[in-house]
Image (cartoon, coloured by chain):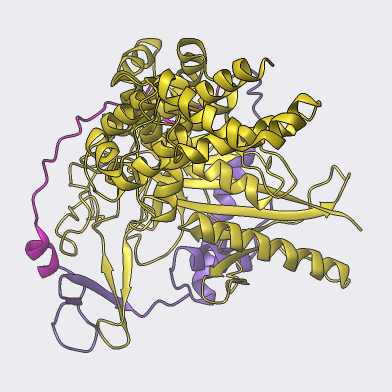
């Protein structure tokens, strides 16, 4: 599958990563290389082989349903992102984390 | 043209666990913002998810309750999208290999107008475990949204049906059945106001007889059965009108506005559905063995279907009565408590489904708040059974008990409702009635059957409604030589 810089821009947008045109070009070359590798792997006959979802052949350990986390809000909010208005003020208010307004 | 509506549901049931699905933070509702948002909930770098055993048990319980295949091996996947209430940038969910596979539930669709009630099987496509997102709070700070991550990581079971439903009534009957079932097996508190049970409804229409599905629109986040009914009815009409006017339906997510009763498409985000699922490398495959299933099975209560069969066999109830009583755990428990307190099964069933349910509905009360307890109902039914009062008098006693006027026997006494079952007394009344209504007697003897009923009516009236009707009938028959 051939990638275009438009694909790169779309993927970058989905991950909210800003890429310039130059960066998109450079990323296109790298990703095309990776796609080549994938094509090579896809050429291998895997008929009858169950897909692997993890590189280690072990199963998930389960945790007992017991509360073991205490309230660390104060500590976490001291390292919250800053407001972005030039001050060092953290983007928190009344215990909430603040983000630019989101309205559907 | 005649149209057919096709409906499928996706329901998010919040699982009743103490802690989140991937961390030991509490899931208690109503805490101060972010006081239950641990480092996993807020997605600090380097944290790892550890799966909650109880959440898995809840999924197994559900699978067993709907006779589904429970996957011996299922896989958690990342569903990638960008939103502030999802700080990781992905939701941990299940995609290709869900924990619960195909199952089914039987629903009872109530009678409507001329159409009688009927049963229908709704097929479950799958149910999978996933984590809930946080909540956005608007308006606290100008130009900003506040994020509360207490809910982030709360375990959910998303239950998906096949597009099997053909009316709003069927969809609502299914949603109610599922709502009752998840509470019955104790995996979800069913609180729709708090968002513990949320339904998304996929609606499409097609010409009747067609086997091709139309383009569907998804109504998001319905949190009451009434809104669900209204939203589906509106959406169905809208789609049919659009198509009949020569328009086309575009796949979309729509929201229901309870104030206007209308559905409206959300602004479509072109890339909103590019979730780029892939197996979460932080989590290993979930294995569920036969032994796990057997262990969970031991913790399960008797299921509604089994209880229904038992009610038919043990109490001789009809299919309909048994189905109605087991439609809700509370109703079934109330019925059993009434029988255990000494009432006969059939009248206990009738009164539970009839008078009690009608009163509760009218006053929008739940059984737990019923002013008449199962024991009180049983004592009332015993007084009918031993001929102390007639059925009609029982209704008055019930009304009085409901209004808190005391216990059965005291009310019967106070209102003078005791039935006259003394043969001598009834004979005396009948003799008087016969003497006073010679014309009717002649009519009856001339072959007019109706005259007999009129005489019974006269006798009941003369006794002020207190005579035992069965005895009146019998004595009257004897006296008239009928």
Chain B's colour?
yellow
Chain A tint in image: purple
Above/below status of A46 relative to B174: above
Q: Residue furthest right?
A: B1
* Along the viewing direction, whichever of B333 and B150 lies nearer the viewer: B333
Percent of width and height locating residue B276: 53, 51
> Residue visible at 30% across and 82% down?
B139
Residue nearer the viewer, B272 or B381: B381
Which of B256 and B291 lies nearest the eye of the viewer? B256
Q: Can see residue B283?
A: yes
Which is nearer the eye, B204 or B305? B305
Q: Is residue B311 left or right of residue A28?
A: left
Image quadrant holding the N terminus of chain B, namely bottom right
Residue B465 rendering spot, x and y as whole percentages? 46, 38
Picture quarter containing residue B34? Answer: bottom left
Please identify the dominant SS of the magenta region. loop
Read off the magenta span. Answer: A50-78
Q: Position of residue A32 (x, y in %)?
A: 59, 54
Determine if the magenta segment contains residue A61. Answer: yes
Q: Is residue A30 above or below residue B392?
A: below
Q: On the rendered structure, is B401 left or right of B464? A: left
Quadrant for residue A60, please give it.
Answer: top left
Q: In the image, what residue occupies the spot 57% across and 61% down?
A: A28
Q: Is residue B8 visible?
A: no
Residue at the image point whose x is 44% and y is 34% from the top = B351
Residue B323 appears left or right of B362: right
In the rendered image, the quadrant that contains the C terminus of chain B is top right
Q: Is residue A80 above or below residue B458?
A: below
Q: Is residue B79 left or right of residue B406?
A: right
């Amino acid at each position: 599958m051939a990638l275009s810089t438009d694909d790169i821009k779309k993927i970058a947008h989905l991950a909210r990563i800003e890429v310039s045109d130059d960066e998109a070009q450079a990323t296109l070359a790298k990703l095309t290389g990776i796609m080549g590798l994938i094509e090579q792997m896809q050429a291998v006959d895997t008929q009858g082989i169950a897909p692997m979802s993890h590189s280690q052949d072990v199963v998930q350990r389960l945790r007992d349903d017991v509360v073991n986390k205490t309230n660390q809000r104060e500590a976490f909010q001291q390292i919250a992102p800053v407001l972005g208005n030039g001050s060092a003020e953290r983007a928190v208010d009344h215990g909430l984390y603040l983000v630019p307004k989101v309205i559907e | 043209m005649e149209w057919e509506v096709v409906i499928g549901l996706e329901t998010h049931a919040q699982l009743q666990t103490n802690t989140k699905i991937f961390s030991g933070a509490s899931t208690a509702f109503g805490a101060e913002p972010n006081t239950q948002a641990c480092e996993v909930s807020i997605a600090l770098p380097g944290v790892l998810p550890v799966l909650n055993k109880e959440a898995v048990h809840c999924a197994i319980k559900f699978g067993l309750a709907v006779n589904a295949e429970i996957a011996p091996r299922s896989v958690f996947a990342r569903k990638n999208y960008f939103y502030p209430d999802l700080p990781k940038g992905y939701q941990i969910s299940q995609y290709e290999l869900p924990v619960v596979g195909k199952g089914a539930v039987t629903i009872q669709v109530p009678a409507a107008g001329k159409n009688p009630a009927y049963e229908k099987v709704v097929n479950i496509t799958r149910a999978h475990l996933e984590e809930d997102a946080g909540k956005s709070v608007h308006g606290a700070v100008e130009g900003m949204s506040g994020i509360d991550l207490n809910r982030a990581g709360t375990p959910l079971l998303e239950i998906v049906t096949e597009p099997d439903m053909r009316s709003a009534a069927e969809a609502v009957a299914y949603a109610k059945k599922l709502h009752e079932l998840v509470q019955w097996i104790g995996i979800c508190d069913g609180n729709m106001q708090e968002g513990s049970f949320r339904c998304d409804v996929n609606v499409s229409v097609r010409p009747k007889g067609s086997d091709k599905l139309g383009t569907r629109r998804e109504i998001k986040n319905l949190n009451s059965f009434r809104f669900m009914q209204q939203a589906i009815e509106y959406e169905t009409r809208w789609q049919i009108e659009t198509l009949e006017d020569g328009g086309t339906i575009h796949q979309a997510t729509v929201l229901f506005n309870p104030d206007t009763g209308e559905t409206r498409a959300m602004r479509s985000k072109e890339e909103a559905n590019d979730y780029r699922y892939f197996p979460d490398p932080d989590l290993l495959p979930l294995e569920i063995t036969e032994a796990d299933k057997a262990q969970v099975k031991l913790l399960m209560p008797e299921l509604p279907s089994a209880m229904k069969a038992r009610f038919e066999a043990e109490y001789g109830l009809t299919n309909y009565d048994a189905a109605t009583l087991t439609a809700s755990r509370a109703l079934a428990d109330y019925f059993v408590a009434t029988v255990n307190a000494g009432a006969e099964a059939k009248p206990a069933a009738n009164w539970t489904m009839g008078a009690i349910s009608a009163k509760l509905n009218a006053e929008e009360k739940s059984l737990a708040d019923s002013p008449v307890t199962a024991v009180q109902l049983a004592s009332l039914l015993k007084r009918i059974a031993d001929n102390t009062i007639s059925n009609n008098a029982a209704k008055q006693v019930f009304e009085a008990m409901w209004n808190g006027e005391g216990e059965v026997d005291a009310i019967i006494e106070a209102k003078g409702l005791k039935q006259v079952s003394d043969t001598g007394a009834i004979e005396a009344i009948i003799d008087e009635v016969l003497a006073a209504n010679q014309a009717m007697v002649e009519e009856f003897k001339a072959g007019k059957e109706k005259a007999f009923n009129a005489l019974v009516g006269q006798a009941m009236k003369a006794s002020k409604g207190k005579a035992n009707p069965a005895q009146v009938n019998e004595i009257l028959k004897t006296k008239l030589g009928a």
